[in-house]
Image (cartoon, rainbow, N blue to C red):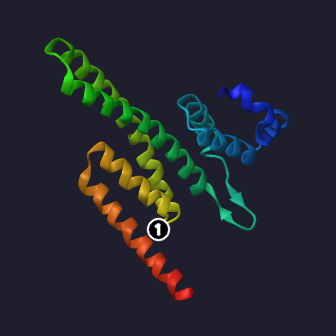
């Protein structure tokens, strides 16, 4: 799908045509593009989030919602990194079956993909950390940090966040069971 095919039918895009600085419409469009999940839609979402991340996200009854915007932004980087990670796995398979002449070229391609993936994850990690600073115990940020650190190769930090996430889910489950 092309953004131009979707744009006329999205309420947020129509609102932005009338009022480009409307925060919730920008956020909604960025989230919608992220949900499409293709690399072009994720890049478009990234551009919107880059523009809106530092806006005032104070809601009259819900308080500061900035942590939600940052969480969604971090997930865009994480999703983009997943595409590079998929390519890395494909290159690993090709490397196992390649001849010596092709191996050098494939290794170079793999290094490029790893660098691009890690650059995206290095953008996601501080966003997730900021989410935790604004909203301690946020399960999405904790899970995101576990995933990002494990993908980058920071196994100890990744496992620490994974254990924290598991503890959070167990506590939540016990709470739900006690409630019912």
**Above or below — where is 153 with respect to 160?**
above
Determine whether the residue tagged by mark 1 lies in a helix, strand or loop.
Answer: loop
Would you place residue 99 above or below residue 168 in this image?
A: above
Q: Residue furthest right?
A: 18
Q: Is residue 83 left or right of residue 8?
A: left
Quadrant where the N terminus is found in the figure: top right
In the rendered view, tell whether residue 66 sits above or below residue 13. Answer: below
Q: Residue at x 60, y 32 (%)?
A: 41
The residue drawn where x is 51% and y is 88% is: 178
The residue where tag 1 is placed is 137
174 or 24: nearer the viewer:
174
Q: Residue at x 61, y 38 (%)?
A: 36
The quadrant of the picture occupied by the C terminus is bottom right
> Residue 118: where, in percent of width, then height?
35, 37
Q: Residues within 10 Å of mark 1 (few under 14, many from 20)?
A: some
Q: x, y percentage for residue 19?
A: 82, 38
Residue that sits furthest to the top in the current view? 101
The structure residue drawn at horizontal position 82% and vertical position 40%, both measured from the top left corner, is: 15
Q: Give residue 35's position: percent from left, percent from top.
A: 60, 43
Asked where in the image residue 158 lies, by quadrant, the reply is bottom left
Outermost residue toward the front in this view:
97
Q: Quadrant of residue 160?
A: bottom left
**In this picture, residue 89 sits left or right of residue 32:** left
Q: Is residue 40 above or below residue 168?
A: above
Q: Quadrant of residue 157?
A: bottom left
Q: Residue furthest left?
A: 100
Residue 96, position in %: x, y? 19, 27
């Amino acid at each position: 799908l092309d953004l131009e095919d979707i744009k006329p039918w999205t309420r947020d895009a129509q609102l932005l045509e009338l009022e480009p600085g409307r925060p919730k419409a920008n956020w909604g469009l960025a989230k919608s593009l992220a949900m499409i999940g293709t690399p072009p839609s994720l890049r478009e979402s990234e551009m919107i989030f880059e523009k809106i991340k530092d806006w005032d996200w104070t809601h009259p009854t819900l308080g500061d919602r900035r942590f939600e915007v940052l969480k969604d932004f971090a997930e865009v980087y994480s999703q983009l990194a997943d595409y590079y990670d998929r390519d890395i796995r494909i290159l690993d398979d090709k490397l196992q079956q390649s001849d010596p002449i092709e191996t050098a070229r494939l290794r170079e391609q793999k290094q490029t993909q790893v660098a691009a993936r890690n650059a995206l994850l290095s953008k996601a990690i501080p966003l997730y950390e900021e989410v935790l600073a604004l909203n301690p115990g946020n399960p999405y940020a904790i899970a995101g940090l576990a995933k990002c650190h494990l993908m980058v190769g920071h196994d100890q930090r990744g496992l620490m966040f994974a254990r924290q996430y598991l503890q959070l889910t167990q506590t939540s489950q016990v709470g739900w069971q006690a409630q019912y």
